[in-house]
Amino acid sequence: MYLSKRILGAIPVLIVVAAVVFTLMQFAPGDAVNMLVSDEASEADKAAIREAWGLDRPPLVQFLSFLGNAVTGDFGTSFKYKVPVMELVMEKLPATIELALASTLVAVVIGIPLGVLAGARPGSVWDSMASAFSFAGISMPNFWLGILLILLFAGQWHLLPSGGRTPWGLDLPRITGFHLVDSVLQGRWDAFLSTLRYLALPSIVMGTNMMGIIAQMTRASVQEALHEDYVVTARAKGLSGQRVLWRHAFRNALIGVVTIIGLEFGALLSGAMIVETVFAWPGIGSLLIQGIAARDFPLIIGLVLVYTGLFILVNLLIDLLYTLIDPRIRVS
Amino acid sequence: MNTQTSPATLPGLCARLRKRYRQMTGFKALFGLGMVAILLLMGLFSPLLAPHAPNSQDLMSAMRPPDWTGPHVLGTDHLGRDILSRIIYGSRVSLVIAIAVAVFASLLGVFLGVVGGYFGGRIDAAVQKVTEIFWSFPPLMLAIAIVAFIGQGLVIVVIALTAQRWIPYCRVTRAETMALRDREFILSARSLGASSRFIILHHILPNVMLSIIVMTSFAMANAIIAEASLSFLGLGVPPHIPTWGGMLSDSRAYISSAWWMALFPGLAIFLTVLGLNLLGDALRNQFDPKLKSH
């Protein structure tokens, strides 16, 4: 009930978002038809193309017909690639999601222990180190980190590939589009390992900011929790420091961390545009940047909506996750 | 592991923490202020500080590595332009955008937040709806959409980055205004016949000012990274204006042969943003009574 209400609530937001982007498009200088025809096209040719693509209709009519089609999953046809936008998105989306999940994993696996260590011993060397590390992570421009890591790991030491998603010539039939999943399903361990190698640098780069924020958040929550009565009680009962830390303090800190992951997932998606560009990762982020360069309006609108929809969806999932972690939060 | 929570050591721990906190806060504030001062100096006095003109090309001395004693301390790029000079001039764009975005975002956000929080009702509901819509775009996505459709340029970048930056200001000031609205000193001012305008200007705004200052530090850090990201993607200010993000974008093609083209502009972004983030954190520690009492 709650879920369906939330999903229904997201629909008007998406419609307004589409309207905002459509309005912006009206300010775009030049004639969209020029993206579709060669420079020598005559006015008659242009008029024909304009009619064929529906560009001759008033903006409001274009918008309403776009909305009508979007409901059925049809986001129009890309100017540049001349195929349905949805087809392009579906082809590239798994790459972005795979990268985003790997980055979140990196951020969580490093950020949480770092934050717990720092929070458990406030004022210690660990605390200072974790603090410095997390501030550096938050302030790091991810495209710079990406370039530096390519420089070191690919250029200098030749340990990892500098970009792309698969080595040249690797033939992995597509099942889900997630390379890690596909290679496991087909028992292709060579492909699995090479996917990991290609994932390593981009996911570290993309996860760095989130890692810093998670570490700070965990540190503050653990520190706060360790002063709570129930932790003092647990200590008084004779539970070991480790047990108190992880079972009591950390569990409570987790709620804040989950919130942060949800909030930061949006930043992660935006970061994907930049990281995918740096690492030539074939996801929807680099697709969007190419679409902007080509002034491929249907592709841009479709991708902005897909991005926003994903962002809303993730925050919805996070809300649901709360109830699992903390039984006190039962959504009313 | 010693979790240091036994009641006997708690006062000692708190005293140690307080001292440590003061030291850390002092260091953060100092580092942050230092970085802001450097940014300001570089931006204001670029022509005096830069050893070369930022766009003067010299293909004969292209891609020279850093040389502490030579004419190009941090090296040159693929067109023979001096990296140090371009970093110094590039600070201007970062500075202008950071200040402009912070000013416009705070004006818009604080206005909407205070008005919504103070009057409540329909006005507040309307403000909340607008906030919700702008917030549903992933960060930077709205900015990219604006720049992608409308075009490049300093003013457009400022508008594009302000489009979402006002929201944190709005949220925080709204919450604080709602908490203040029913406090006794406001009620008594109202019963003495003070107008809403007077109360907002003389009683509410001074009380939310500290939060605004703290947020501004973070907003500037955020704006600098966002502008650099847009420039890196080729969506920022026109390419003939030197920017740190644009320099990094240029460096990608020469990554294996000229590491200095990537290292120094990135370091400039990193240190500036780090400084602003540390400053914001120090200000928050200093002003937030909840943290201070720890």
Image: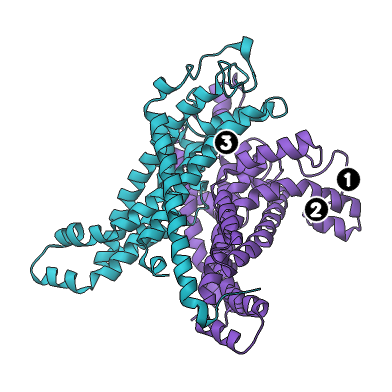
Chain colours: A purple, B cyan
The disc numbered 2 marks a residue on which chain?
Answer: A
Mark 2 Cα shell of 10 Å, populated few (<14), some (14-19), many (≥20)? many
At 42% from the left and 59% from the top, the residue drawn is: B22
Q: Is residue B279 left or right of residue A324?
A: left
Q: Position of residue A102 (x, y in %)?
A: 71, 56
The disc numbered 3 marks a residue on which chain?
Answer: B
Q: Is residue A55 visible?
A: no
Indicate which disc residue B74 carries: none
C-beta proximity under 8 Å, tags 3 and 1: no
Q: Are marks 2 and 3 on the same chain?
A: no
Q: Position of residue B105 (x, y in %)?
A: 36, 48
Please tell me which residue lies in front, A147 or B126.
A147
Q: Amino acid at mark 3?
A: Gly
At 60% from the left and 17% from the top, the residue drawn is: B79
Mark 3 Cα shell of 10 Å, populated few (<14), some (14-19), many (≥20)? many
Disc 3 is placed on an element classified as helix
Q: List the residue tagged with mark 3.
A: B266
Q: CA distance from mark 3 to mark 1?
A: 37 Å
At 54% from the left and 41% from the top, the residue drawn is: B270
Q: Position of residue A307 (x, y in %)?
A: 58, 52
Asked if A321 appears above or below B87 in the picture, the reply is below
Q: Is residue B138 left or right of residue B190?
A: right
Q: Amino acid at mark 2?
A: His
Please tell me which residue lies in front, B182 or B272.
B272
Please tell me which residue lies in front, B278 or A80.
B278
Q: Amino acid at mark 1?
A: Asp
Mark 1 Cα shell of 10 Å, populated few (<14), some (14-19), many (≥20)? few
Q: Position of residue B266 (x, y in %)?
A: 57, 36
The disc numbered 1 marks a residue on which chain?
Answer: A
C-beta proximity under 8 Å, tags 2 and 3: no
Q: List the residue tagged with mark 2.
A: A179
Disc 2 is placed on an element classified as helix
